[in-house]
Image (tube, rainbow, N blue to C red):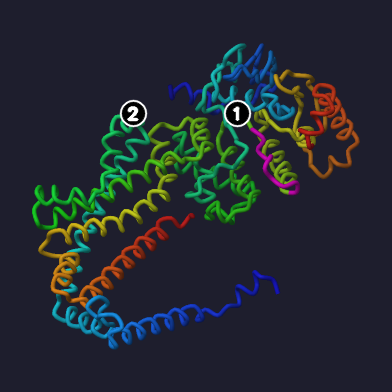
Amino acid sequence: MSALHSARVEKWWIIPTVQLAGFVVVVLLWEWVSVNRIIDPLFIGRPSGIARYLKTAIMDGSIPVETAWTVGSTLAAFGLGSIAGIAFGLLFAVYPIAEKILEPLFSGLNSLPRVALAPLFLLWFGLGVASKIALGFSLTFFIVLANTVAGARSVDRDFLILSETLGASKAVVFFKVMLPSAIPTIFSGLKLGLIYALLGVIAGEIIASQHGLGQLLTFLAGTFDTNGVFGVLLVLGLTGIILTKAMTELEKRLLRWR
Amino acid sequence: MNASHRAFEPAPPSKQTAPAIEISGLTHVFAGAMQAVSDVSLSVRAGEFASIVGPSGCGKTTILNLLAGLLPLQTGTMTVAGRPPRAGRHDIAYMLARDSLFPWRTALQNAMVGSEFRGVKESEGRARAVEFLKRVGLERFANNYPKALSHGMRQRVALARTFTLKSPVLLMDEPFGALDAQTKLQLEDLLMNLWNDERRTVVFITHDLSEAVTLSDRVIVMSARPGRIVDDVSIPLPRPRSVRALQRDPLYHELYAKVWGRLEVAVGQANIDSEISG
């Protein structure tokens, strides 16, 4: 049998089963190490304790409410950041002079570790969601900008020659050739930008906030509730996965032609 | 501007003898002093199918790009339908070596690109695109995206896109150069059928001598760089032609040998072996 064929006969349930088994083994080992104090539970918590925390925190509404704050701020930061990023990216692609003028400013800001801006954003926008949105925006914007410029520049030269020989107007070339060509690359920027928006928002919440999973995380760590910290991390991971999956789904629908 | 385009749009190739393309004393030098074309003079009648053959780098594509207005004219004169070439003229259609279909458009939407970009009414453009998609045998694939089409099918769509335009002058830059031998023969037959109905003026660039002899009324042979015209061989094979039938036609083989001989003399055996596969 060929290698191609034997790769195909693999049963669909083998991989999920191995993954589940691995997960169970790690959790049991973790519990055992913790119960027998081989490592102090203060550092690593305990799976059963994490489950108990999550149950309580979900029932009393704190996890759903804080998740809503974080996700809401993330979506706002992502939305504003990507609109601005795409707008500037297209501007740069159409008017390279605009990019030349703004290049020193933008590359300077982009090289700056964005979290360092958090104190300034707190001062400007206060402890509420606005400062978190600003931080998420500052990350998303540059990622989407870079991808939009790269996408718009990657237009197939033959497409431009064809358009030129057809006598297409600049507007037609922009909307019907350049923009559709750039969309796949813009989309990879958007997927990355969403994750970075979440990163910015969480960082902002950790530094100073009244709401959100980041704030909850700081609070739990400050009170040495290790199980709680792990529980929130789990929720954060799941949130990230769901956001990414949603974007991938959207991409599949919009870019069926790929 | 637009009004002058429209005046040329319908022009049917009625006067078979009027020169559609006139080139005289054309010399083109690229940056770095590489001379691509040297003192080329050429005239193509309206309704004539003229091929330009020659080794790679002989400047045949340069001539085509100058005719399409994609390059600025340096030395010499050049007119298409009596006027200097300019990119975007509605009476000229240009077909590239690669299909250059937009991957985000279906076959039908791609066939409509030309008329759409030229501002033809949507219903009219669609009707013509549907018609030509049918002519190239792809009506069942109208709603497929290019990724679901084979190379040959994609180039068929590109042919439909080109013929959907009503331009009386067609400039084709090795449109079948990237296809496998079998597909190429099928598309040559298809092109002959499409062309035979309307007899538009065609300048066809190729390095495949059998393709040139099969399709053309005239084969213009160019030398290696800097490209000069070495010979202008008329191909009096009766039309309509078919690729398969021509294989059994002694005149076809005679003409093929003649073109080959001219090229040999001009280029030298060494260059032929390395650069011509036809």
Report the span colored magenta.
B173-182
Nearer to us in this view, A26 or B247: A26
Helix or strand or loop: what does disc 2 sit on? Answer: helix
Marking on residue A97: 2
Residues packed near mark 2 inside 10 Å, few (<14), some (14 to 19) or many (20 plus): few
Subunit of mark 2? Answer: A
Please tell me which residue is depicted at 26% across the width and 58% down the height of the picture.
Answer: A199
Name the residue carrying label 1.
B168
Q: Is residue B159 above or below residue A41?
A: above
Residue B25 place in picture, x, y as percent? 66, 11
- Report the side of A205 relative to B168 (left or right): left
What residue occupies the far front of the structure in this picture? A38
Q: Residue furthest right?
A: B250
Above or below residue A245? Residue B153 is above
Magenta stretch contains residue B166: no
Residue A10, position as x, y percentages in the image = 58, 78
The answer to whether marks 1 and 2 mark residues whose Cβ atoms lie closer than 8 Å is: no
**Does dot 1 land on a helix, a strand or a loop?**
loop
At 39% across and 37% down in the image, what residue appears?
A174
Residue at 20% x, 81% y: name it: A53
Corner quadrant of residue B249: top right
Q: Name which residue type carries label 1.
A: Pro
Within 10 Å of disc 1 (Cα), the crowding (few <14, some 14-19, many 20+) is many
Q: Position of residue B6 (x, y in %)?
A: 48, 26
* Most frequent secondary structure within the magenta stretch: loop
